[in-house]
């Protein structure tokens, strides 16, 4: 039987961490960073600070339940949206990413954007979504997936389109996936820099999972993702835990659920990630670093832990089961 890792101390500390990013005024007002040095934005009221405070609290089962407080959260999140075009605004991410991320945060409160997503309207036709996806810069797959997946996630959460639209959307993606790696886009895969394709594909994969569609070439996704895991058990950046790691863990775990390919190799790899993740989040020096100061990156780490707890039943102990936001709605 595998050893049990206990991160109860870390999870019990997270409310204090989140509270440290809170601004004065209504409870729902948060900054992204506390350490202002060299930060371009996010040390004042910030869309990602607010959304990721909600995401973390949901994951650890402490999202506010009182109607008055929930209404404050909804109002603060909705205030980031422009009425004229429906865009949720933040200078650090694309319009599609910020809009999907804030729409997803609102869904945690059973709420939706105050205004229609007018700027996404051209994507509502078969020709429109095909043209939009085709025009993305697939040589920059990680960043551009924020846009391609953002439209799909926002439409899925708001129910702005029906099943036929998702047939078009996933049909286009299925036609364009690379059959050797299971990543996007066919003919544009850089084998010498493969990780951005994994990270980009992760964003489409959570839309597949949320829409109950089959991830294409799951066996190849597993092979390529295992190849990209570093010796430390982490992905892409040695010594840090964040979005790169939820990307890799999610791709392996959800593809494994679908096909069972290389089950033993997958479980061994995920245990390496778990060991590395636990070592980091239980290190108080690491938790005081600038990496952890970013509540958006911290949410990526917490989301990774939630996925690992599902993937490795009984091997990660927390005060209460971690909730995976991606099982409620797409987009992080």
Image (spheres, grey):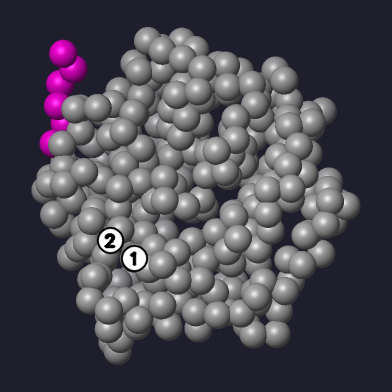
Q: Are marks 1 and 2 in contact (CB under 8 Å)?
A: yes
Residue 161 inside the magenta-drawn segment: no
Q: Quadrant of residue 294?
A: bottom left
Left/right placement of residue 272 relative to residue 257 reads left
Q: Quadrant of residue 280?
A: top left
- Position of residue 160 relative to residue 302, above or below, is below
Residue located at (50% from left, 67% from top): 102
Q: Position of residue 223 (x, y in %)?
A: 55, 16
- Position of residue 263 relative to residue 211, above or below, is above
Instruction: Using the rendered image of the protein, determine whether residue 227 is visible from the camera's viewpoint.
Output: no
Q: Which is more toward the observer, 78 or 239?
A: 78
Q: Position of residue 292 (x, y in %)?
A: 32, 55
Q: Quadrant of residue 107?
A: bottom left
Find disc 1 in the rendering and name its residue. 53
- Position of residue 57 relative to residue 130, above or below, is below
Left/right placement of residue 257 relative to residue 185 reads left
**Residue span colored magenta:** 1-6
Residue located at (35% from left, 18% from top): 267
Quadrant where the N terminus lies? top left
Q: Position of residue 18 (x, y in %)?
A: 26, 66
The image's mark for residue 23 is none
**Majority secondary structure of magenta residues:** loop
Instruction: Using the rendered image of the protein, determine whether residue 57 is visible from the camera's viewpoint.
Output: yes
Left/right placement of residue 141 relative to residue 295 reads right
Mark 2 packing: few (<14 Cα in 10 Å), some, or many (20+)?
some
> Which type of secondary structure does the marked residue at label 1 adopt?
helix
The image's mark for residue 57 is 2
Residue located at (18% from left, 17% from top): 2
Residue located at (34% from left, 65% from top): 53
Q: CA distance from mark 1 to mark 2?
A: 6 Å
> Which type of secondary structure does the marked residue at label 2 adopt?
helix
């Amino acid at each position: 039987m595998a050893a049990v890792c206990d991160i109860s101390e870390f999870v019990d500390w997270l409310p204090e961490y989140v509270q440290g990013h809170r601004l004065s005024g209504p409870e729902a007002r948060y900054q992204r960073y506390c350490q202002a040095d060299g930060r371009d934005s996010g040390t004042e009221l910030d869309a990602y600070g607010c959304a990721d405070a909600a995401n973390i609290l949901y994951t650890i089962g402490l999202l506010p339940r009182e109607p008055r407080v929930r209404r404050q959260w909804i109002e603060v999140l909705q205030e980031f949206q422009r009425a004229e075009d429906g865009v949720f605004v933040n200078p650090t991410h694309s319009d599609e990413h910020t809009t999907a991320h804030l729409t997803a945060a609102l869904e945690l409160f059973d709420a939706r954007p105050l205004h229609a997503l007018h700027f996404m309207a051209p994507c509502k036709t078969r020709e429109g979504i095909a043209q939009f996806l085709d025009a993305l810069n697939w040589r920059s797959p990680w960043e551009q997936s924020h846009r391609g997946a953002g439209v799909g996630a926002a439409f899925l959460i708001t129910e702005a389109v029906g099943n036929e639209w998702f047939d078009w959307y996933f049909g286009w993606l299925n036609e364009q996936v690379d059959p050797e790696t299971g990543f996007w886009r066919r003919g544009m895969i850089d084998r010498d820099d493969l990780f951005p394709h994994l990270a980009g594909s992760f964003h489409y994969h959570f839309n597949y999972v949320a829409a109950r569609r089959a991830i294409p070439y799951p066996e190849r996704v597993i092979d390529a993702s295992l190849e990209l895991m570093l010796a430390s058990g982490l992905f892409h950046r040695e010594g840090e835990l964040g979005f790169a790691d939820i990307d890799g863990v999610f791709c392996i775990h959800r593809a494994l659920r679908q096909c069972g390919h290389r089950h033993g190799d997958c479980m061994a790899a995920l245990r390496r990630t778990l060991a590395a993740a636990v070592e980091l989040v239980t290190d108080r020096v690491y938790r005081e670093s600038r990496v952890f100061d970013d509540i958006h990156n911290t949410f990526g780490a917490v989301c990774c832990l939630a996925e690992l707890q599902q993937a490795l039943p009984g091997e990660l102990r927390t005060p209460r089961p971690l909730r995976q936001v991606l099982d409620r709605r797409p987009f992080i």
